[in-house]
Image (tube, helix red, strand yellow):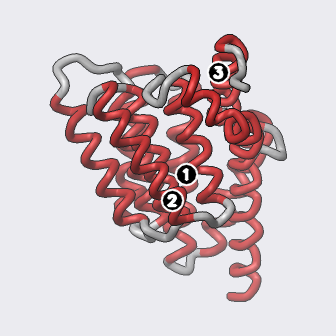
Amino acid sequence: CALPISVLCTTGDLATALRLQGKLDEANELCEPRLDSMRRVLGRDHTLTLSAEQIVAEAMAARGEHAAAQVLGRDVLNRARKAKGKADPITINATVALGRVFAASGRPDEAISVVRETRAHVQRKAVRRPNDLFVLDDMLAELLEHSGRLQEAVAMRRRLADEAERVNGIDHPLTASALNKHALATAALEDSRGHHAAAVAIYRKLLPTYEDALGPEHPETRSVAGRLEASERRAHGAE
């Protein structure tokens, strides 16, 4: 039987919060078993249903179910555009989710195309939230890194960091995050050029920052630690 609306709404809100914290598996454990109930009770175009489907699509891609993840992710984005509008926040989130699905499937160019399409709609919108374009550009930079276009990614990360500082100030968490991501992209570029020692120095400086801010087990922290370890191996191999 279908779960009560209050339970489904609480589930959706909690799952969304977990996803924002990078806890995709925990978010999916809440969403996937309740997805049919959310569709029946809340409706397929309800914001919480669409958000839950985005989480499920990302989780499917993460465990290798790429074709099914792409079908679901594309369907969610199309329904969000139709029900909410092409520049609505839920559409922006659906775009980012589909971008991650394509990237996990080894198709970053398609992901970049999807993000740029939504970005064009947002840019044409007369009134928009201050961070809407920032969110999409942040995703574009991530996809450029994923596709190996590191010089472009570094340039975009630098622009985003400057914009975050101009809008929010140097002490704002968004500015700190943008500066850290620029440093990570720079380290990856240095690594790709064979400057492994320079990359190691950047990663060693960044890792404590991530550990303090997010905790040692957070996916982003583990990613930085993994990058550091790989760069150290390459640096030692080059000696």
Q: Residue 172 — which label?
A: none
Q: Quadrant of residue 200?
A: bottom right
Q: Are marks 2 and 1 in contact (CB under 8 Å)?
A: yes
Q: Decide which of 10, 36 is in the foreground and name it.
A: 36
Q: Which residue is mark 1?
A: 183
Q: Nearer the viewer, residue 201 or 186?
A: 186
Amino acid carrying label 2: it is Thr
Q: What residue is rendered at 55% in x and 63% in y?
A: 104
Amino acid type for the residue under numbered disc 1: Ala
Question: Can residue 181 be seen from the camera position used here?
Answer: yes
Numbered label tally: 3
User: Which mark is nearer the camera, 3 or 2?
Assistant: 3
Nearer-N-terminus badge (3/2): 3
What element does badge 3 sit on? helix
Q: Is residue 9 above or below residue 28?
A: above
Helix, strand or loop status at disc 1: helix
**Picture quarter containing residue 150?**
bottom left
Residue 171 appears in the figure: no
Q: Residues within 10 Å of mark 3 (few under 14, many from 20)?
A: some
Which label is found at residue 13? 3
What residue type is disc 3 on?
Answer: Asp
Q: Position of residue 175 (x, y in %)?
A: 51, 31
Q: CA distance from mark 3 to mark 1?
A: 32 Å
Q: Is residue 15 above or below residue 208?
A: above
Left or right: where does residue 68 sit relative to residue 153?
right
> Residue 40, position in %: x, y?
56, 27
State the image quarter where residue 22 is shown. Answer: top right
Residue 124: horizontal and vertical position, in percent?
16, 31
Residue behind mark 2: 186
Q: Name the residue rendered at 35%, 65% in the picture.
A: 109
